[in-house]
Every structure is written in structure tokens, then in C-alpha cells.
Amino acid sequence: MFSARFTTLGRAGARAFRGARFASTSSSSSTAEGAFGKTNKDAAIWFAKAAAVSGVLGFTLSEYVLTDERLAKLKNPFVDEPQAFTLLDNGMHAHPLPWDHRGFFKTYDHAALRRGYQVYREICAACHSMNLIHWRNLVGVTHSEEEAKAMAAEYEYQDGPDDKGDLFMRPGKLTDPMPAPYPNDEAARVANGGALPPDMSCIARARHGEEDYIFNLLLGYSDPPAGFQIRDGLHFNRYFPGGAISMARAVYDEVVDYEDGTPNNASQIAKDVSTFLAWASYPEHDERKKMGMKAITMSVAMLGLSIWWKRFKWSHIKSKKLAYRPSKDVREV
């Protein structure tokens, strides 16, 4: 009898304990205070006090601790000594221009790229090389495959050795790089008064401002200001660091006759060749934007699917309600 009674009380006590545990959780959640008080008024008072304390602390630090005299004694790790900045020594900042290809959904204007290549071939190629650009890179961008093969065949490239061990000259192919105007750097320096014309393959990537810098540089020639001395053989350009550049102005109105009849003023010519040089530096530009759009589209789709899956898997847990129901089997001993 004692054993049966003890068993009955034990089972009833276990059920009561489980109910009491749920009751404790439910009651604590219903009576818990917020992080900043029980009501909105308490939270507003807490934030007002925090703002007042922060203001007093900030004023104290700025007026009595972190003063200008004390901060002046700290050495700036990025600047060793004060240096004067002049426009002539560093060049003017290139004005940003509204290029068509800089929009998120925009690509290169391939008609402008074709005109830009024509400007490079007729003007720039006399001094500047593009060693990293091959004829095959123009296929499908500025010219067709037949046109690119015909242009490459106009130049001869050294190849070999042949069966006799001798080198020979052959017409160019699509796999050949664009021809350089000089055989080596020393020959280029001799022909340009000691200055080495830079390679134009990545010139936009290598200059601050990229195509903005190229456009402004091509049209930035003018007479030097009063008091600025420039030696013979140099030309004043306010966008070039130092103000003195070895390259003479090469872009003028009607200096190039476009095949498609586009107006050939100096601004249009500078715009087209700047666009072409920007493409030479970033030939993957259009493909990168296309892949970016695909990645964003897939990410949005996966995000929506993830939100739906999370709500689906957790719905039965978040919709569950715990309620305390006291057991009727508990009897006082």
C-alpha cells in the first residue's frame, strides 16, 4: 500500500513539476522588462540620460584632454613632414566625364571603339606600342575576323627558324601582337629626344582618372603661364605632372577622317581614342558586367528561396504556444 501510494504521488509530482517549469517560463516571459525599461517613457528617459552623459563626456574630452596642443605633438605616421602642393608639380585633376560605358547596364560603344582604333593606328601608333594587344583581340569588338586578318597581313613579323636554321619574315597572323614602332627602348628614346613613349596597352589602368585623364591630357595643351620656364623640346600641359611633356599635341580638328562619317572634331577624336584605350585596359568590361547581372539575379532568387525555406522549417516552432495547466492528480499528503 505504501509502495502504490508513493508511486501515485511520484507520477503526480512529476507532472506537476513539468507544469511548474512551463509556468515559470511563461510567467517570466510575460513579466520581463525591456532592455531600456518597462514602458516607452522609461526608454525615452534612459536615452535622454545617455545622450546627456555622452555630451558632457565628449565636451570634457575635447576641451581638457584631447586638445589641439596635445594632438599636435603626436606624429602622423603617414606624413613625415609638411609638403606644399602645387598644380604644376602634380598636374590638374582630370575632370570626370559622363562616359556611356560607366552605367551599370551600359557596355562599350563598339562604333566608338572602331573609330578609336583608327585614331590609334593613324596617330598614336607612330610612337606608342600596344604589346599586350593581339590582332585576335579585335575580332568581334572593333572588326570582323576577315578585317583583322587583312590588317595583320599588312605587317611582317620575324619567325623561324626554318629547315636551314635561318630566321625569316612572314605576314602577320591573328595570334601576333600589334607591331611596335621601334625595335627597342633605346631606339625609341633616340627618336623622341630622350623620352620613352609608354606602352598603351594598359595606359588607362595605370593612370589616375583612367580615360578621364587621357581625354583631358589630349586636349589640355596651352601656352605656359607667366613665370613658368619650359625648355626646348617640351610642351606645356596642365594635366601632366610637372606641366612639361615631351609629346606634342597630336589631336586637332579634322586630323582623322572617320569611315562612318562621324564629325571629326578634336573632342570627338579624343573621346574615341580614350574609349579604345579604356577597352585595351579592361577588355573584360562587358563580360564582367554580364556576369555581375547573372550573379545578382541568382543571389536574389536564392535569397527569396532561403527566406521561404527558413519560414517553412521554423513555422511549426514559432507558431507553438506553451500554456500551464495544473494537474488534477496532485493531492496533498
Image: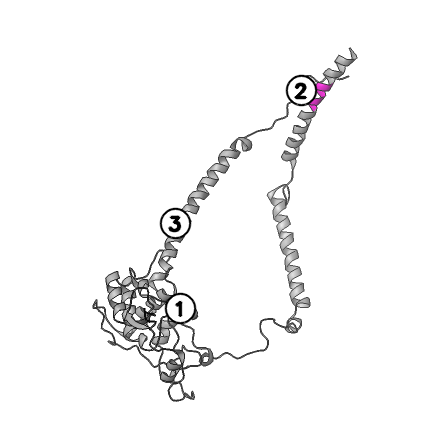
User: Considering only vertical position in the picture, is 295 above or below 307?
Assistant: below
For marks 2 and 1 on the same chain, the one whose residue lies earlier in the sequence: 1
Label 2, secondary structure: give it: loop
Residue 11 placement, left or right of 94: right
Looking at this view, name the residue that lies furthest to the top: 1
Q: What is the three-letter code of the residue carrying label 2?
A: Ser
Indicate which label's residue lies in the foreground, 1 or 3: 1
Instruction: Give the Cα distance between marks 1 and 3.
Output: 27 Å
Instruction: Give the Cα distance between marks 2 and 1.
Output: 82 Å
Residue 102 placement, left or right of 4: left
Indicate which label's residue lies in the foreground, 2 or 3: 3
Q: Say which residue appears at 39% left-offset and 56% top-offset.
A: 288
Q: Say which residue appears at 58% left-offset and 74% top-offset.
A: 79
Dominant secondary structure (helix, strand or loop) of the stretch shown in magenta:
helix
Q: Which residue is mark 2?
A: 327
Queried whether the magenta region covers residue 13, the answer comes back as yes
Q: Which residue is mark 1?
A: 202
- Count of labels in the image: 3
Q: Which residues are magenta?
A: 10-16
Q: Nearer the viewer, residue 226 or 46?
A: 226
Q: Nearer the viewer, residue 261 or 42?
A: 261
User: Where's residue 75, x and y in %?
Assistant: 63, 73
Question: Which quadrant would residue 214 be assigned to in this image?
Answer: bottom left
Q: Point out which mark residue 69 bears.
A: none
User: Where's residue 88, x and y in %?
Assistant: 44, 81
Q: Quadrant of the N terminus?
A: top right
Q: Say which residue appears at 28% left-offset and 78% top-offset.
A: 252
Label 1, secondary structure: give it: loop
Looking at this view, name the residue that lies furthest to the right: 2
